[in-house]
Image (spheres, rainbow, N blue to C red):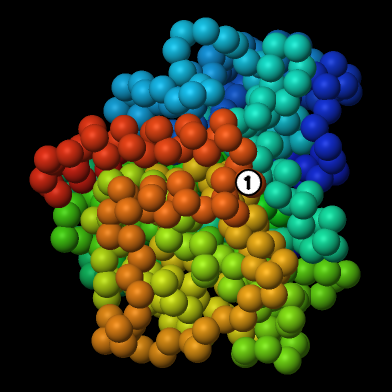
Amino acid sequence: MDEPGGYGGGFGLDDFASDSDLADVPDDHWLIEGLEASGLHSVALTWVDVAGHTRVKTVPLARLQEAAEHGVGMSPVFDVYLVDDSVTTSRHIGGPDGDLRLRPDLDRLTALAGQPGWAWAPVDRFHQDGRPYEACQRRFARSMVRRAAEQGLELRMGFETEWVVRRGDEPACTGPAYGMARVVELSAYLGELLTALRDQGLEVLQLHPEYSPGQFELSFAPTDPVGAADQAVLVRETIRALSLAHGLTPSFGPAVAPGAVGNGRHLHLSLWSGGRNLCADGEGPFGMTDVCEPFLSGILRELPALLALGAPSPASYLRLTPSRWAGAFQCWGLENREAALRFIAGQGANAEIKCFDPAANPYLVVGAVIAAGLAGLESRLALPVPVAGDPVRQSERRLPRSLTEAVEHFAASRVLGEALGEALTEAVIAVRTAEVELFAGATPQELAEATRDRY
């Protein structure tokens, strides 16, 4: 985590600028002409809903400039869709009325190596009259980045991506956990995946087999928070495309099989100011500065509420069990993979939040984590004593054991409610409550099967 990274399309100053009017878009005909010459014909415009699904509108490449200037229409109701595509409602969002404009961020435009002829760009969402849409999750993440910048802070973040790959109903490889045998068995698939990620400009730090049968993990160089969330979307869809091309099924659900180690999507973060890593060379615990410690304290304090965003499925709590390195306890420790908040000291000092999983909307996650950290900084919180060893043996406080419990903490969180605003907060509560009701009475097996391939 000690070096910043980027990926195809680059990162523009717009990521840290205020929301602009729909008409304030540069002429990018030169860009489109170049893409046409390279064989691209269509662009996938994506956003992520509250339930964690990547939704899409596609346009022919020739219409990309018009989409950037005027947006593409889409109903706001998708923010109250559930994991099975049924629909709930909230006070601000719900029903058949209304329309939004999806405006692609052309700074993030990327040719998809796993889908020849296609490009991808994330969108920001606006009202028809050009006003920023108050429940746009990507806009929320950017607003929290700006709030940190107002205090002289730059955050660098990166998600780890875990998934299980199957051939039919069986794991696609039979080698042992973390074993070279899995890499040998799937070397063509993994090699093409790494090549595709490289061709898209993604800086892979490592790829390795994980614990569960057929499970792998990718980690990437850190970048700005909105870029990290964009990258999480792009990485998942690249894995999906390459898996399907090899006749394999990727599962990104938090629980692929009950009783087994599930998929996490851990978030790494570091704090910077003036080119200095504020997680190192300080007088606090393990070298933390007097900015880093209260920031991480704020995250630790809000973890029970943050789970409603970072572990947002009823299936998340099949994964979030003790002694599986899932981070089931509200504690922190130095290089402690069982703690929910793991601190890594030294040259590349950073913190890792281990209790989050791939069902989460990454934009909500990065924005809410920043909000929690800034609240801790404002209150000058101090970290408790770090935990060494397995916290299950030390009477540490368990994080919520169910989505219902996490939603109760989320609804009571002044910090997160203020940061997200009424529309997003109420949509989150409505979707989470409806998914609890959707799976009421389901066995762990039924819950895992219903959700493992939905993300």
Tell me which residue sits at (87%, 21%) in the image: 24
Q: Quadrant of the N terminus?
A: bottom right
Q: x%, y% of residue 210?
A: 34, 65
Is residue 104 among the parts visible in the rendering? no
Q: x%, y% of residue 423?
A: 57, 31
Q: x%, y% of residue 92?
A: 53, 23
Give left or right: position of 185 versus 118: left
Q: Quadrant of the C terminus?
A: top left
User: In this view of the protein, which residue sits in the foreground, 172 or 68?
Assistant: 68
Tell me which residue sits at (68%, 36%) in the image: 139
Tell me which residue sits at (38%, 50%) in the image: 408
The quarter of the picture where residue 401 lies is: bottom left
User: In this view of the protein, which residue sits in the foreground, 381 or 368?
Assistant: 381
The quarter of the picture where residue 313 lies is: top left
Secondary structure beneath label 1: helix
Give left or right: position of 46 versus 253: right
**Crowd around label 1: few <14 · some 14–19 · many ≥20 (10 Å):** few
Residue 133 vertical placement versus 250 (above, below):
above
Give left or right: position of 281 versus 209: right
Residue 262 vertical placement versus 31 (above, below):
below
Three-letter amino acid code at the position of disc 1: Glu
Tell me which residue sits at (72%, 26%) in the image: 132
User: In this view of the protein, which residue sits in the foreground, 227 or 380?
Assistant: 380
According to the picture, the residue beneath numbered tag 1 turns out to be 418
Is residue 146 among the parts visible in the rendering? yes
Residue 447 vertical placement versus 75 (above, below):
below
User: In this view of the protein, which residue sits in the foreground, 420 or 237?
Assistant: 420
